[in-house]
Image: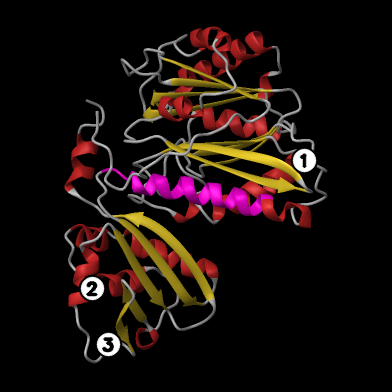
């Protein structure tokens, strides 16, 4: 078992039940021994689902099924997730596993096939033993409870070193609603929509089309702003279920003022979960915040921020606690977004380092070097060309990353 990340939160919150959601976990025998590796969530009738999935051109069979289910109306009765095998690049055998899993769920729960969602995470290209997951479904249905969010978060882990959960209570039109979320992810993290696997549920009553809009916006400002290693997974999926049990008034649009507090809470949950993924980056020892301002647009700012955050030279310098700000200059220049040398300003740990195309007069590296020795690293870059801004989160690149991934299939 991997040693817990030094960046792990000190205390994980306790997640209360979400009205209309039941959970069960067990061991499937697919890959892991001595731990649960398959999770089932069952939703009450009337639940709607929103989702975002990877833009990878080699996405997995479970992802393809989720896309189809979302297009089929976005209703939800069940979610089945396994860890240890991604069921990706497994051809017709992979499609059959998904089909049989969905079939088993519809029989056990009594629902339509398009109301069942499936996710898998783990090794790519290895077929799952036929019947391994479908045979678990009936057993899982008998174990369903309204509690167990922490067990669900643990069951979907692969190289993760700690469970990742978040919760918030907010209101819609004066009615109290709860939002719970779990996520897994540690490596192969450069989301092009979301992170590896993330599941959020709320008892709020929100029409599916509006729920989809809210999730897409939140994902773009959170999961799409993190990176560990610049690699986008074949399995990336984030789903948001709304059971409608809170009994709040129905919002009329995604911009309805009644949703203000809910949108803030949802974004807070997504930010929290996304940053936990970075804090559990494979081999990570430092959490890095890259803030870019003054770009020609917010999109350009994000492009520059990701160029810095994905640079192996920047990440290894930070791992070695070397205040080598020249690597940040390099990353800005290679990003492809518009930048001008003599307008570029850089700060590390709040200390200004460059201005007017060169190092600032009297620059003292001592406080920057001290900042680099900490766990939390702050980089700010101002492009000086406009009002576009973005914040990206990443981690350092250490020998630990190589060790974990060199042995991943062992």
Instruction: State whether residue 144 is above or below residue 395.
Output: above
Q: Which residue is mark 1?
A: 207
- Asked if the residues shown at circle 2 and circle 1 are in contact, with their CB atoms under 8 angstroms apart, the answer is no
Q: Residues within 10 Å of mark 2 (few under 14, many from 20)?
A: many
- Asked if the residues shown at circle 3 and circle 1 are in contact, with their CB atoms under 8 angstroms apart, the answer is no
At 80% from the left and 48% from the top, the residue drawn is 251
Work out which quarter of the rendered image holds the C terminus and state it. top left
Query: Dividing the picture into quarters, in which one does residue 243 lie?
Result: top right
Q: Which residue is mark 3?
A: 358
Q: Position of residue 73 (x, y in %)?
A: 74, 32
At 35% from the left and 48% from the top, the residue drawn is 279
Along the polypeptide, which appears first: circle 2 or circle 1? Answer: 1
Say left or right for 216 vs 11: right
Instruction: State whether residue 146 is above or below residue 157.
Output: above
Q: Nearer the viewer, residue 78 or 376?
A: 376
Along the polypeptide, which appears first: circle 3 or circle 2? Answer: 3
Circle 3 — which element?
Answer: strand
Instruction: State whether residue 211 is above or below residue 78.
Output: below
**How many numbered markers are drawn?**
3
Circle 2 — which element?
Answer: helix
Work out which quarter of the rendered image holds the N terminus and state it. top left
Q: Which residue is mark 2?
A: 368
Q: Residues within 10 Å of mark 1 (few under 14, many from 20)?
A: many
Query: Dividing the picture into quarters, in which one does residue 204 lie?
Result: top right
Rounded to the nearest whole Å, what is the CA distance between mark 3 and mark 1? 53 Å
Q: Position of residue 283 (x, y in %)?
A: 24, 44
Q: Nearer the viewer, mark 3 or mark 1?
A: 1
Residue 118 image label: none
At 66% from the left and 12% from the top, the residue drawn is 109
At 25% from the left and 31% from the top, the residue drawn is 408
Rounded to the nearest whole Å, what is the CA distance between mark 2 and mark 1? 49 Å
């Amino acid at each position: 078992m991997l040693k817990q990340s030094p960046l792990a939160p000190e205390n994980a919150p306790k997640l209360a039940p979400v009205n209309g959601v039941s959970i069960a976990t067990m061991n499937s025998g697919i890959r892991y021994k001595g731990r649960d590796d398959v999770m089932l969530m069952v939703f009450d009738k009337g639940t709607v689902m929103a989702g975002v999935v990877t833009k990878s051109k080699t996405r997995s069979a479970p992802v393809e099924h989720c896309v189809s289910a979302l297009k089929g109306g976005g209703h939800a009765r069940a979610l089945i997730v396994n860890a240890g095998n991604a069921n990706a690049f497994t051809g017709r055998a992979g499609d059959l596993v998904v089909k049989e899993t969905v079939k088993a769920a519809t029989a056990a729960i009594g629902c339509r096939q398009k109301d069942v969602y499936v996710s898998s995470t783990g090794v790519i290209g290895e077929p799952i033993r036929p019947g391994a997951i479908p045979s678990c479904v009936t057993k899982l249905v008998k174990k369903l409870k309204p509690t167990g969010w922490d067990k669900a978060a643990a069951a979907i882990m692969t190289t993760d070193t700690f469970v990742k959960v978040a919760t918030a209570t907010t209101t819609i039109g004066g009615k109290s609603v709860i939002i719970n979320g779990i996520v897994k992810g540690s490596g192969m993290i450069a989301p092009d929509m979301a992170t590896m696997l993330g599941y959020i549920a709320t008892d709020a009553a929100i029409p599916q089309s509006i729920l989809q809009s809210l999730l897409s916006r939140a994902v773009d400002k959170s999961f799409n702003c993190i990176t560990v290693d610049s690699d986008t997974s074949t399995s990336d999926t984030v789903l948001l279920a709304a059971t409608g049990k809170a009994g709040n008034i129905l919002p009329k649009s995604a911009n309805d003022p009644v949703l203000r507090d809910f949108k803030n809470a949802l974004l807070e949950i997504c930010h929290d979960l996304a940053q936990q993924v970075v804090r559990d980056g494979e081999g990570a020892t430092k959490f890095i915040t890259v803030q870019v301002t003054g770009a020609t647009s917010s999109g350009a700012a994000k492009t520059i921020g990701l160029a810095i955050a994905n640079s192996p030279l920047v990440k290894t310098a930070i791992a070695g606690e070397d205040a080598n700000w020249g690597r940040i200059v390099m990353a800005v220049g290679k990003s492809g977004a518009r930048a001008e040398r003599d307008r570029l300003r850089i700060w590390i740990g709040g200390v200004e380092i460059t201005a007017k195309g060169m190092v600032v007069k009297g620059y003292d590296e001592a406080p920057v070097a001290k900042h680099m020795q900490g766990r939390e690293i702050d980089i700010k870059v101002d492009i000086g060309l406009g009002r576009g801004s973005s914040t990206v989160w990443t981690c350092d690149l250490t020998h630990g990353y190589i060790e974990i991934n060199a042995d991943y299939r062992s």
